[in-house]
Amino acid sequence: MDKNAEFTFLEDFTAELSAKKLVFPTSLGATMKIRKALSQPDISNDQVARIIGAEPVLSAKVLHLSNTASFNPSGRQVTDLRSATLLLGFAAVRNIAISIGMKQLAENKYKGGFSVQMDGLWRRSLRVAALAMVVARNKTCMSPDKAMLAGLLHDIGKFYILNRAHHYQHIFTSEALLWNLIDDWNASIGAAILEDWEVPDEIRDAVVNFKHYQAVPQHKISLTDVLTTADFLDAVFVHNQPEQLDWSQVPASLQRLHIDAENLPALMLETKTELSIVLHAIQ
């Protein structure tokens, strides 16, 4: 890629970051403010209900999800946001908010000629999030909701670049040039965005490191192990052929998490269920 063109894009990104004016669609910016508010340790359920109530799409989705069999097996109708958030839990509401924000980002009418790429990126983020959640729940003691959040945000740098690319059509004269920049810079840009949004260090570290992760055997299992595993298994999930996996070529994180040919099919099946719940919640 033309280094001058690359420098122009990165210079503009740095200026936006320094000025605290990252250019994302309003929906995603509002979503991250909601996530931050819901992460406050002393927030009350009444406050959460008021925050959600300020975002109509999120309000509708939270109420809808709280009345599904997956979260409300009793079938007793939930009609207010306070009861809905008590039933779902704050972590689930945070992740629903981010899923909705990223869906709206993928559907942004100003995304130029990158609609197919944005839609594919969004769907992949949901799959990796579901995989990370299932792996964390079954193979670690860490929070499944935290793992899901890492999966949702693991490609946020790619989202940002694709979302901004239509402003730089004079630079990205071919799709190959655009993807060269994405491959080189999406992790660093993603980490900077997550820092600006005050996302926890553990999630930022996983986003930066999962693609080139070299696990240290004596170190405890980390969120990066989970995200590395989920990212790798996404291709297996898409093709639905776990039996064809070459176990001599898998990342060390799978071995550290004790994922093998015997237990992988059950993880894939559970992931399919989780993914259907998420998609049902936000469609």
Image (cartoon, rainbow, N blue to C red):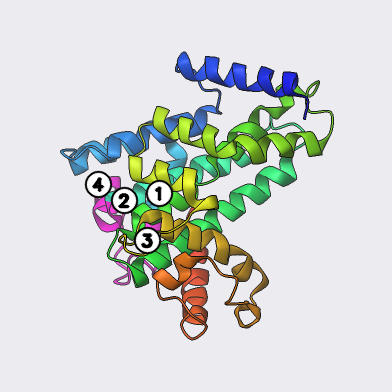
Task: Give the residue displayed 71% in from the left and 21% down from the top.
Answer: 167
Mark closer to the chain start, 1 or 3: 3
Q: Is residue 82 magenta?
A: yes
Mark closer to the chain start, 1 or 4: 4
In space, the residues marked 4 and 2 are separated at their CA atoms by 14 Å
| Residue 256 falls in image quadrant | bottom left
> Would you name the residue on which mark 3 appears?
67
- Using the image, tell me which numbered label, if any, was put on residue 82: 4
Mark closer to the chain start, 2 or 3: 3
Are the two marked residues, 2 and 1, in contact with CB atoms closer than 8 angstroms? yes
Which amino acid lies under the numbered mark 1 shown in the image of this protein? Asn
Mark 1 against mark 4, which lies toward the viewer?
1
In space, the residues marked 1 and 3 are separated at their CA atoms by 17 Å
Q: Residue furthest bottom?
A: 262
State the quadrant of the N terminus. Answer: top right
> Would you name the residue on which mark 2 appears?
91
In space, the residues marked 2 and 3 are separated at their CA atoms by 17 Å
- Using the image, tell me which numbered label, if any, was put on residue 246: none
In space, the residues marked 1 and 4 are separated at their CA atoms by 17 Å
Q: Which residues are magenta?
A: 65-89
User: Are there few (<14), some (14-19), or many (20+) residues within 10 Å of tag 2?
Assistant: some
Name the element at disc 1.
Answer: helix
User: Are there few (<14), some (14-19), or many (20+) residues within 10 Å of tag 4?
Assistant: some
